[in-house]
Amino acid sequence: MKNSFKKNFGKNNKEYKKNSDISFYSKNTKGSEKNERFLNNFAKNKNIENLNKNEKNNTFSSSKRRKPIFKSNTEFPNKNAENHQDFTNKKNFDDWIWGKHSVYEALSSERAINRIWCTSEIFSSDKFYLLLKDSKLKGVLIEEVSWNRLSQLTHGASHQGIVLQLAYSKTISLEQLIDFSKHNCTNPIILALDGITDPHNVGAIIRSAEAFDCKGIIIPQRRSAGLTGTVAKVAAGALEHLHVSRVVNLNRALEELKNNGFIVVGLSSSGQLSISNFLEKVPLVVIVGSEEKGISLLTQKKCDHLLSIPLKGKTSSLNASVAAAISLFHLTSK
């Protein structure tokens, strides 16, 4: 047993030396590679620690630097006040009237009015009640607001509880528009706007309507831009040659137009009938909806036809004023 152990031990020892001599270089190279990796990682960790320390120092120093910046924030209210004053100076109040005496004279002289804001006390007073009620029947939008709201609108002016905005053109009643259109054309076209609140779109539509010889335009009292200075400017003079009727309720106005022989058509991207295939020559009311929502569902139910403009490109919709101009071209060229 002892001899065998010595033989095996010696044999194993010789093999170990032989193998160790053979793999000495490879082991050393692997060890050196490990050492290099260890040193590299150690250096990287040191760099990371140094970066973290620098970041902590930077955050500490940046917090110190914030103090004078924080102090300068006390100057912001003054800057905001200056910006507010600049906005007040830039706002155009040329078509605005406020104050009890000034507004009363404007209402009594039957000037064209776009909108009125007043407090509940003014609306219920004996001096203004009948005048305001008559203006509302003419399609003027009247809003009962708080005293603070009026101060915001006029930027702190002495409004005495009532403010109005003049219109750049007088409006006529729906009955007058129907009589005028029927007596001046066998197949008149009247344009009606539904939910178009952008004054630039309204002005461009009025310009196209007058260019294609429409007999009038209907604007609802709410959810629509009024006849403001921007509308008149974009219309480029067309507002002086086109009759405009402001109605309290558009759907009731459409019913009255139907009773007077008009066919109501609405422009809709989902319309089943192409406008190029619509060949009827009758008195028409063409409804143009807003670019985002289109014609409201209640108004669509009042339409006899929903017409679509065929588009060949990838654009899925048109601007409201562009759609109105294209439709009027198709309907008046037949």
Image (cartoon, grey):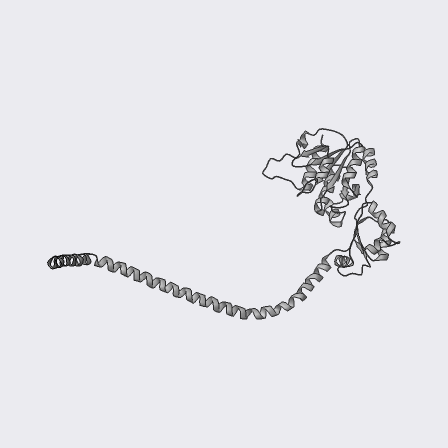
Residue at x 60%, y 68% (from the top left corner): 70
Quadrant in which the C terminus appears = top right
Please state if 32 lies on the left or on the right of 65 as rendered: left
Question: x, y (%) of residue 141?
Answer: 79, 48
Of all residues, the one furthest to the front in this rendering is 1
Residue at x 46%, y 67% (from the top left corner): 54
Which quadrant holds residue 44?
Answer: bottom left
Of all residues, the one furthest to the left in this rendering is 3
What is the tally of numbered marks visible in this picture? 0
Question: x, y (%) of residue 113?
Answer: 81, 49
Which quadrant holds residue 306?
Answer: top right
Please state if 151 lies on the left or on the right of 49 as rendered: right
Of all residues, the one furthest to the right in this rendering is 126
Quadrant in which the N terminus appears = bottom left
Q: Return the residue nearer the eye: 131 or 231.
A: 131
Residue at x 84%, y 53% (from the top left corner): 123
Which quadrant holds residue 217?
Answer: top right
Residue at x 83%, y 38% (from the top left corner): 175
Question: x, y (%) of residue 30?
Answer: 27, 58
Question: x, y (%) of residue 38?
Answer: 33, 62
Classify 26 as above or below 218.
below
Can I make out residue 287 in this image? no
Can I make out residue 136 in this image? yes
Classify 264 as above or below 26.
above
